[in-house]
Amino acid sequence: MKKRQFKWIAIYISVLLVITACAETVPVDECLPEAEGYGFWSGLWHGLIAPIVFIVKLFSDDYVIYALNNNGNWYDFGYLFGLSISLGGGGRASKKK
């Protein structure tokens, strides 16, 4: 691996770890039907941090990957959009070599 590639991978991982340090946790008991549901922006944030939360979830039962109390389609759209951003989407795979 070239030094330049290694440098960018290290920067990407460092920024990802700094951003995910801000992840909010909400006890499941607080996710009641009468509470305000999570919308597009929360879904986007949860999608961005999903890969890190997945790894944390393997070792702890205190975290959930998907918000139980969401407002439906807008949360789902934001979640999938954030997930595609954090995982790289499919744009790079369709590029010609």
Image (cartoon, rainbow, N blue to C red):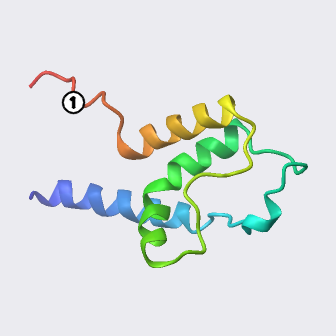
Q: Nearer the viewer, residue 7 or 93?
A: 93
Q: Residue at x 36, y 34 (%)?
A: 89
Side of 69 where 15 appears, left or right: left
Q: Nearer the viewer, residue 67 or 6?
A: 67
Q: Nearer the viewer, residue 4 or 92?
A: 92
- Residue 86 spot, x, y in % from top left: 43, 46
Q: Residue at x 45, y 59 (%)?
A: 16
Q: Is residue 91 depicted above or below 69 in this figure?
A: above
Side of 34 where 26 appears, left or right: left
Q: Residue at x 13, y 21 (%)?
A: 96
Q: Is residue 97 depicted above or below 54 in this figure?
A: above
- Residue 70 spot, x, y in % from top left: 72, 43
Q: Is residue 15 depicted above or below 45 in this figure?
A: below
- Residue 49 spot, x, y in % from top left: 52, 55
In the rendered image, the residue lying farthest to the right is 34
Side of 82 where 68 appears, left or right: right
* Amino acid type of the residue tagged 1 in the rendering: Ala
| Quadrant occupied by the N terminus | bottom left
